[in-house]
Amino acid sequence: MTLLRVKTEWTGFTGAPGYTVMHFNGSDEAAGSSPDQCHEAVHTFFTAIASRLPGVVRLRVDPNVERLDEESGEIVAFELATDRPVISGTTTGNFSSATGACITWMTAGVRNGRRIRGRTFLVPLASAAYDTDGTLNPTARTNIETAAQALNDDFGGLVVFSRPSGPGITDGQAALVTGVRVTDKTAILRSRRD
Protein backbone atom coordinates (compact mmCIF):
# COMPACT_ATOMS: atom_id res chain seq x y z
CA MET A 1 0.00 0.00 0.00
CA THR A 2 1.11 3.55 -0.58
CA LEU A 3 0.31 6.12 2.07
CA LEU A 4 -0.56 9.79 1.91
CA ARG A 5 0.82 11.95 4.72
CA VAL A 6 -0.87 15.26 5.54
CA LYS A 7 0.87 17.68 7.93
CA THR A 8 -0.75 20.50 9.86
CA GLU A 9 1.30 23.27 11.46
CA TRP A 10 0.13 24.91 14.71
CA THR A 11 1.37 28.48 15.35
CA GLY A 12 0.58 31.60 17.39
CA PHE A 13 1.39 30.49 20.96
CA THR A 14 4.38 29.94 23.23
CA GLY A 15 6.11 26.70 22.27
CA ALA A 16 4.96 26.91 18.65
CA PRO A 17 5.29 25.60 16.08
CA GLY A 18 3.61 22.27 16.68
CA TYR A 19 2.71 19.67 14.07
CA THR A 20 -0.04 17.12 13.57
CA VAL A 21 0.65 14.34 11.07
CA MET A 22 -2.12 12.12 9.67
CA HIS A 23 -1.77 9.18 7.29
CA PHE A 24 -4.26 7.84 4.76
CA ASN A 25 -4.50 4.82 2.47
CA GLY A 26 -3.31 6.21 -0.86
CA SER A 27 -3.52 2.98 -2.84
CA ASP A 28 -7.09 3.30 -4.08
CA GLU A 29 -7.86 6.82 -5.20
CA ALA A 30 -11.24 5.68 -6.52
CA ALA A 31 -12.24 5.05 -2.89
CA GLY A 32 -11.60 8.67 -1.95
CA SER A 33 -7.92 8.72 -1.16
CA SER A 34 -6.62 11.42 -3.46
CA PRO A 35 -4.22 13.98 -1.97
CA ASP A 36 -6.86 16.69 -2.31
CA GLN A 37 -9.55 14.60 -0.58
CA CYS A 38 -7.18 13.79 2.30
CA HIS A 39 -6.24 17.47 2.66
CA GLU A 40 -9.91 18.48 2.67
CA ALA A 41 -10.77 15.83 5.28
CA VAL A 42 -8.06 17.08 7.66
CA HIS A 43 -9.09 20.71 7.09
CA THR A 44 -12.73 19.82 7.83
CA PHE A 45 -11.71 18.03 11.03
CA PHE A 46 -9.77 20.99 12.40
CA THR A 47 -12.49 23.43 11.36
CA ALA A 48 -14.98 21.37 13.38
CA ILE A 49 -12.93 21.78 16.57
CA ALA A 50 -11.85 25.43 16.09
CA SER A 51 -14.24 26.50 18.85
CA ARG A 52 -12.12 24.47 21.32
CA LEU A 53 -8.91 26.30 20.42
CA PRO A 54 -7.61 29.61 21.79
CA GLY A 55 -8.09 32.59 19.50
CA VAL A 56 -4.32 33.01 19.01
CA VAL A 57 -3.89 29.52 17.52
CA ARG A 58 -3.53 29.25 13.75
CA LEU A 59 -3.61 25.92 11.90
CA ARG A 60 -2.34 25.54 8.36
CA VAL A 61 -2.86 22.23 6.60
CA ASP A 62 0.15 21.90 4.29
CA PRO A 63 -0.98 21.46 0.66
CA ASN A 64 2.22 19.49 -0.10
CA VAL A 65 0.98 15.96 0.54
CA GLU A 66 3.69 13.30 0.78
CA ARG A 67 3.23 9.89 -0.83
CA LEU A 68 5.07 7.19 1.13
CA ASP A 69 5.99 3.58 0.60
CA GLU A 70 4.38 1.67 3.49
CA GLU A 71 7.15 -0.87 3.97
CA SER A 72 10.17 1.45 3.81
CA GLY A 73 8.51 4.64 5.03
CA GLU A 74 10.36 6.54 2.33
CA ILE A 75 8.81 9.47 0.46
CA VAL A 76 8.23 8.50 -3.17
CA ALA A 77 6.47 11.67 -4.37
CA PHE A 78 5.01 15.03 -3.38
CA GLU A 79 1.55 15.91 -4.61
CA LEU A 80 -0.13 19.28 -4.39
CA ALA A 81 -3.60 19.64 -2.88
CA THR A 82 -5.79 22.73 -2.96
CA ASP A 83 -4.41 25.28 -0.48
CA ARG A 84 -7.32 25.87 1.90
CA PRO A 85 -7.62 28.83 4.32
CA VAL A 86 -5.77 28.94 7.63
CA ILE A 87 -7.99 27.81 10.53
CA SER A 88 -8.10 30.10 13.55
CA GLY A 89 -9.13 29.21 17.08
CA THR A 90 -12.26 31.10 18.09
CA THR A 91 -12.22 31.16 21.90
CA THR A 92 -10.95 34.14 23.87
CA GLY A 93 -9.49 34.04 27.36
CA ASN A 94 -6.60 32.42 29.16
CA PHE A 95 -5.14 29.04 28.26
CA SER A 96 -2.20 26.77 28.99
CA SER A 97 0.09 26.33 25.99
CA ALA A 98 1.23 22.87 27.18
CA THR A 99 -2.09 21.09 27.84
CA GLY A 100 -4.94 19.80 25.73
CA ALA A 101 -6.70 16.65 24.59
CA CYS A 102 -5.54 13.32 23.16
CA ILE A 103 -7.36 11.33 20.50
CA THR A 104 -6.58 7.60 20.42
CA TRP A 105 -7.10 6.00 17.02
CA MET A 106 -8.03 2.30 17.40
CA THR A 107 -7.23 -0.34 14.76
CA ALA A 108 -7.54 -4.11 14.34
CA GLY A 109 -3.89 -4.31 13.27
CA VAL A 110 -1.27 -6.19 15.29
CA ARG A 111 2.48 -5.66 15.23
CA ASN A 112 4.99 -7.55 17.38
CA GLY A 113 2.17 -9.03 19.44
CA ARG A 114 0.56 -5.67 20.25
CA ARG A 115 -2.46 -3.86 18.88
CA ILE A 116 -1.57 -0.93 16.66
CA ARG A 117 -2.95 2.35 18.00
CA GLY A 118 -2.20 5.95 17.17
CA ARG A 119 -2.50 9.23 19.03
CA THR A 120 -3.18 12.80 18.00
CA PHE A 121 -2.54 15.53 20.56
CA LEU A 122 -4.62 18.70 20.38
CA VAL A 123 -2.51 21.20 22.31
CA PRO A 124 -3.29 23.90 23.32
CA LEU A 125 -6.99 23.96 24.09
CA ALA A 126 -8.92 27.00 25.28
CA SER A 127 -9.69 27.23 29.01
CA ALA A 128 -13.40 26.83 28.19
CA ALA A 129 -12.66 23.21 27.17
CA TYR A 130 -11.84 22.28 30.78
CA ASP A 131 -14.11 21.37 33.68
CA THR A 132 -13.75 22.69 37.24
CA ASP A 133 -11.67 19.63 38.20
CA GLY A 134 -9.12 20.23 35.42
CA THR A 135 -10.36 17.48 33.11
CA LEU A 136 -12.01 18.00 29.72
CA ASN A 137 -15.60 19.11 30.03
CA PRO A 138 -18.21 16.79 28.48
CA THR A 139 -19.16 19.24 25.72
CA ALA A 140 -15.59 19.72 24.51
CA ARG A 141 -14.82 16.02 24.76
CA THR A 142 -17.93 15.11 22.76
CA ASN A 143 -17.17 17.76 20.12
CA ILE A 144 -13.62 16.47 19.61
CA GLU A 145 -14.65 12.81 19.58
CA THR A 146 -17.50 13.49 17.14
CA ALA A 147 -15.19 15.39 14.77
CA ALA A 148 -12.60 12.60 14.95
CA GLN A 149 -15.23 9.92 14.33
CA ALA A 150 -16.59 11.92 11.39
CA LEU A 151 -13.09 12.18 9.91
CA ASN A 152 -12.80 8.41 10.03
CA ASP A 153 -16.40 7.51 9.08
CA ASP A 154 -16.87 9.99 6.25
CA PHE A 155 -13.47 9.35 4.74
CA GLY A 156 -12.68 5.71 5.52
CA GLY A 157 -9.03 5.79 4.56
CA LEU A 158 -7.44 7.03 7.79
CA VAL A 159 -4.61 4.76 8.96
CA VAL A 160 -2.15 4.47 11.82
CA PHE A 161 1.35 4.07 10.40
CA SER A 162 3.95 2.07 12.32
CA ARG A 163 7.29 3.18 10.93
CA PRO A 164 10.02 0.70 9.98
CA SER A 165 12.01 -0.55 12.97
CA GLY A 166 15.29 0.87 11.67
CA PRO A 167 17.15 2.41 8.71
CA GLY A 168 17.01 0.23 5.62
CA ILE A 169 14.47 -2.16 7.17
CA THR A 170 11.22 -2.66 5.27
CA ASP A 171 8.82 -3.67 8.03
CA GLY A 172 6.62 -0.57 8.06
CA GLN A 173 2.93 -1.33 8.55
CA ALA A 174 -0.30 0.65 8.22
CA ALA A 175 -3.60 -0.33 9.84
CA LEU A 176 -7.00 1.18 9.06
CA VAL A 177 -8.62 3.11 11.90
CA THR A 178 -11.68 1.28 13.24
CA GLY A 179 -12.68 3.61 16.08
CA VAL A 180 -11.73 6.67 18.12
CA ARG A 181 -11.55 7.47 21.81
CA VAL A 182 -11.07 10.76 23.65
CA THR A 183 -10.58 10.31 27.38
CA ASP A 184 -11.58 12.77 30.07
CA LYS A 185 -7.93 13.27 31.01
CA THR A 186 -5.85 16.14 29.71
CA ALA A 187 -2.67 15.60 27.72
CA ILE A 188 0.55 17.44 28.51
CA LEU A 189 3.22 18.01 25.87
CA ARG A 190 6.70 18.46 27.27
CA SER A 191 8.74 18.30 24.07
CA ARG A 192 7.97 21.70 22.57
CA ARG A 193 10.45 24.53 22.86
CA ASP A 194 9.83 27.04 25.68
Image: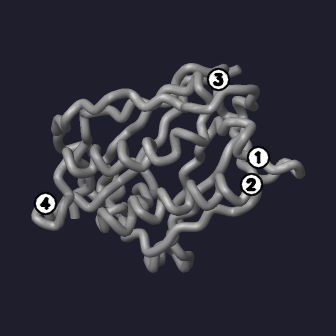
- Looking at marks 2 and 4 on the same chain, the residue that comes earlier in the sequence is marked by 4
- The residue labelled by disc 1 is 130
Q: Is residue 194 above or below residue 7?
A: above
- The residue labelled by disc 2 is 137
- Secondary structure at badge 2 equals loop
Q: Classify 10 Å Cα crowding around label 1: few (below 14), some (14-19), many (20 and above).
A: many
Quarter placement of the N terminus: bottom left
Give the number of the disc on residue 15. Answer: 3
Out of 90 and 28, give the one closest to the viewer: 90
Is 33 on the left-hand or right-hand side of 190? left
- The residue labelled by disc 4 is 29
Disc count in the image?
4
Image point 52% across, 60% down: which residue? 118
Question: Disc 2 to disc 4, how far (Cα)?
Answer: 38 Å
Q: Quadrant of residue 66?
A: top left
Disc number lying in front (2 or 3): 2
